[in-house]
Image (spheres, rainbow, N blue to C red):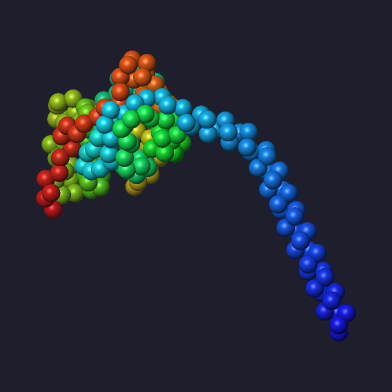
Amino acid sequence: MTMGCSRTTHVASVEVTHSSISEMDEDARINDMIEPYKEVMDAEMDVVIGVCAKTLEKGRPESTMGNWVADLLVERTSAKYGQTIDFAIQNQGGLRINALGAGEVTIGKLYELMPFDNMIVVLHMRGDSLMRLFDHMARSQGWPISSEVRYTISGDKATDVHIHGESLQSDHIYKFGLPDYIANGGDRCTFLANADKRVDLDYLVRDAIIDHVRILTREGREMVSKEDGRVTNTGNE
């Protein structure tokens, strides 16, 4: 009986010790392999590519952060598409930080803002079908949308929708940019599958943001945004 107890204790001790050393060695080897890449990645993320004039904040029905992102999406999407689009939207949940502070802006900070690998899509859609999207955004109390658009949230409906200063025309085809996450039906937007035309640009939303900031810097400009009344909420239920 004594020998049996001794044998069991001895074997357990050897197995645990061996496993622990092996795992530690393996972890060390993996860390050694990763470290050079981590150093390169950290260095890239720390690169300052622009300056934010004032803190950009996230909010509803519109916000300085949401307006800034949606406006740059119009510019970058039009450039990539080769045609001027009518407007752009960005789902609220896709912006992953609540504020982008004033001062120097690094690539890493923009990754924090937009960590998802969402691609930009251009949809062509009739005004009568597009109204469903505006009502959907109204029920969510507003999404980031570009300055070409003005509308009012009345309860769970969008009213007084204007694009380029003109009332939404039911039979007009509008071209707008958005993340593929939404175009694919995310955020309960399955109805967008009925668009008249879809063009996938193979251009990340995040890359569009980074490109825009770099362009601003080359031109000697800073990141600026303001709330301009593009979306108002009457507060009516």
Of the pair 172 and 36, the residue shown nearer to us: 36
Residue 170 in the image: state x and y as whole percent. 19, 32
Residue 210 in the image: state x and y as whole percent. 41, 27
Q: Kindly tell me whether residue 83 is visible in this rendering.
A: no
Of the pair 83 and 59, the residue shown nearer to us: 59
Of the pair 116 and 102, the residue shown nearer to us: 102
Task: Name the residue: 85% across, 74% down.
Answer: 7
Q: Is residue 157 left or right of residue 79?
A: left
From the viewer's perspective, is residue 25 above or below residue 228? below
Residue 156 in the image: state x and y as whole percent. 19, 49
Q: Is residue 47 left or right of residue 143?
A: right
From the viewer's perspective, is residue 194 above or below residue 26? above
Q: Is residue 192 left or right of residue 4?
A: left
Task: Name the residue: 75% across, 63% down.
Answer: 16
In what quadrant of the picture does the N terminus appear?
A: bottom right
Q: Quadrant of residue 203?
A: top left
